[in-house]
Amino acid sequence: MALQATPVRRARLGRALGPEPTAVSGAVLLLPGGDEMSSRRPLPVMATASVRALGRRLTRAGHGEGLVTHVVHYRYRGWNGSEAHLARDADWAAEEVVRRYGDVPVCLVGLGMGGRAALRAAGHTAVDSVVALSPWLPEEDVAAPPEPVKQLAGRRVLIVHGTNDERTDPELSFRLAARAKKANRDICRFEVHSDGHGLHQYRSEVHALAEDFVMGSLFGRAFSRPVQDALAAPPPLGLRMPLAAGFGRSLRR
């Protein structure tokens, strides 16, 4: 009896959210959360539900500008140590955007472990900007090298973290942002007071902030005043900006 070869797992892009523009001039890649260690396949619907609502909002906001939005479907559910599977899949996805649409700017938008993948894969030449929501980051260990930040040079970066996140310490994203800010002034971080890992309590404000940042980064729209102030302020002010309740209801551009 012939042995069957084990099929090779491949990352893939989900179908574009909403109608695909005739001419694509920018792309958002949505990176769902994941586990620290797992060789299992992600569950398609459950894995992507957390980022789809934001993706639909970004699609509507940027359709007239030629924005296309895809969810990245990972090969594995876990980051898996030095394999960094989620970051490698994010890097592949950026390359796939170039193959499909040409030389267009890409924004990586990740949640949780997907936020870590977005930050890590920012070094791809197509990546223009990064949005990391509640990024899962490893505990600092003097025996291990710190999470890299050199790949963030030249990119606009927005980090959003709930102060009551019990899955990943918000201070870790602050420290990473502080290290990155030394070489890249285009980094800001907002704190969502009393919100948890999923940022559900202030989801409308978080999505409005992400929209403001993505549209400004990819298409040159004017950032809202809070984002301008956060980018311009020196640490720690620009890295501990409070996200105001009701943000996005009356933005003036």
Image (tube, rainbow, N blue to C red):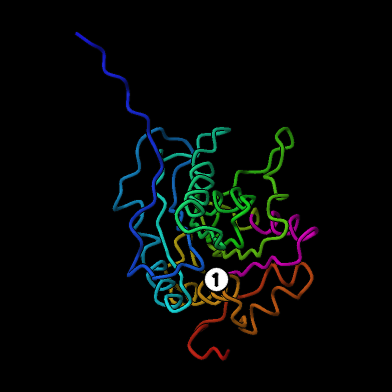
Q: Which residue is mark 1?
A: 214
The answer to whether 144 appears left or right of 203 in the picture is right
The quadrant in which the C terminus is found is bottom right
Q: Position of residue 75 (x, y in %)?
A: 40, 39
Magenta segment includes 182: yes
Instruction: Residue 71: name its quadrant.
Output: bottom left
Judging from the image, what secondary structure is the residue with disc 1 in? helix
Amino acid type indicated by mark 1: Val
- Looking at this view, name the residue that lies furthest to the top: 1
- Residue at x 46% of width, y 66% of height: 199
Q: Position of residue 211 (x, y in %)?
A: 50, 74
Of 95 and 205, the residue lying toward us? 95
Above/below status of 51 relative to 92: below
The answer to whether 126 appears left or right of 27 in the picture is right
Magenta segment includes 243: no
Neighbourhood count class around disc 1 (C-alpha, 10 Å): few under 14, some 14–19, many 20 upward:
many
Of 60 and 199, the residue lying toward us? 60
- Residue at x 71% of width, y 42% of height: 146
The count of marks equals: 1
Of 148 and 106, the residue lying toward us? 106
Q: Position of residue 61 (x, y in %)?
A: 44, 78
Instruction: Residue 152: name its quadrant.
Output: bottom right
Q: Position of residue 102 (x, y in %)?
A: 51, 58
Above/below status of 1 relative to 120: above
Above/below status of 139 relative to 115: above
Q: State which region is magenta.
A: 173-192
- Residue at x 69% of width, y 38% of height: 141
The answer to whether 223 appears left or right of 41 in the picture is right
The quadrant in which the N terminus is found is top left
- Residue at x 53% of width, y 54% of height: 115
